[in-house]
């Protein structure tokens, strides 16, 4: 979706997906020693702020300036800091081997961008680093048609499959890879039952 869509969604005072972190991310960060973490397509900052509260050095980016405003406001509220950039991934100034973890939480890129972005992100991750991903699966179209309040893209090419994950991260040790049904209660834009792909992989 275009940045104008996200600017409009994030311009409201209410946080579209709430202020609390995604539950899958919360579970995966538990027990991991803090280091450097990147949040692509981070929107209003709920997950980045949570990681910062755990002691991670947080970087994030999104195409929406309104998203950045909300994220920095949330960071101030929680007395944490982050490096938040606005733009598309190829034009940003992250470095090779910069991060210990990259958290892709509902980071839905276009069909044309998805694999390219995954390859770029792989370069930013250190050997032994983790990819943590939760995103709507291709099966999710059935759920959003029944309940639009659950949110998520309606473009099949933007949605995820496990086969795409293994193709895009072929050298990773797979710690978790599954397609599963979830009950979402994240703000006003993720409400109800959906289908997601979850992936945790360690770069070898």
Image (cartoon, rainbow, N blue to C red):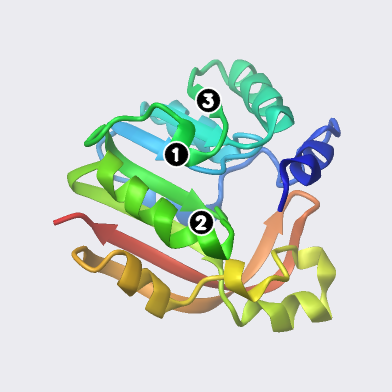
| Horizontal relation, residue 15 to residue 169: left or right | right
Residue 21 x, y percent position in the rendering: 56, 44
Residue 57 is labelled as: none
Spatial CA distance of label 2 from label 1 is 10 Å
- Name above or below for residue 93 compared with residue 97: above
Residue carrying label 1: 90
Residue carrying label 2: 113
Q: Who's the residue at 51% across and 78% down the image?
A: 180
Q: Earlier in the sequence, mark 1 or mark 3?
A: 3
Spatial CA distance of label 1 from label 3 is 15 Å
| Horizontal relation, residue 193 to residue 159: left or right | right
User: What SS does tag 2 mark?
Assistant: helix
Q: Who's the residue at 33% across and 61% down the image?
A: 200
Residue 134 x, y percent position in the rendering: 49, 61
Residue 75 x, y percent position in the rendering: 59, 22
- Name above or below for residue 115 compared with residue 196: above
Residue carrying label 3: 84
| Horizontal relation, residue 195 to residue 96: left or right | right
């Amino acid at each position: 979706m275009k940045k104008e869509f996200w600017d409009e969604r994030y311009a409201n005072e209410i946080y579209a997906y709430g202020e609390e972190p995604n539950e899958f991310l919360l579970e995966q960060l538990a027990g991991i020693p803090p280091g450097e973490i990147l949040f692509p397509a981070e929107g209003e900052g709920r997950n980045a702020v949570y990681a910062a509260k755990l002691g991670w050095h947080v970087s994030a980016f999104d195409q929406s300036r309104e998203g950045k405003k909300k994220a920095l406001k949330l960071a101030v509220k929680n007395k944490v800091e982050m490096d938040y950039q606005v733009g598309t991934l190829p034009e940003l100034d992250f470095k090779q081997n910069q991060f210990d973890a990259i958290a892709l939480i509902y980071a839905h890129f276009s069909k044309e961008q998805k694999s390219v972005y995954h390859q770029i992100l792989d370069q930013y991750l250190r050997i032994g680093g983790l990819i943590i991903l939760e995103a709507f699966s291709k099966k999710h179209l059935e759920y959003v048609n029944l309940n639009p309040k659950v949110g998520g893209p309606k473009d099949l090419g933007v949605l995820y499959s496990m086969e795409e994950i293994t193709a895009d991260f072929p050298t990773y040790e797979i710690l978790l890879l599954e397609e599963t049904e979830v009950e979402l209660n994240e703000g006003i834009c993720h409400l109800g039952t959906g289908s997601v792909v979850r992936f945790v992989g360690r770069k070898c």
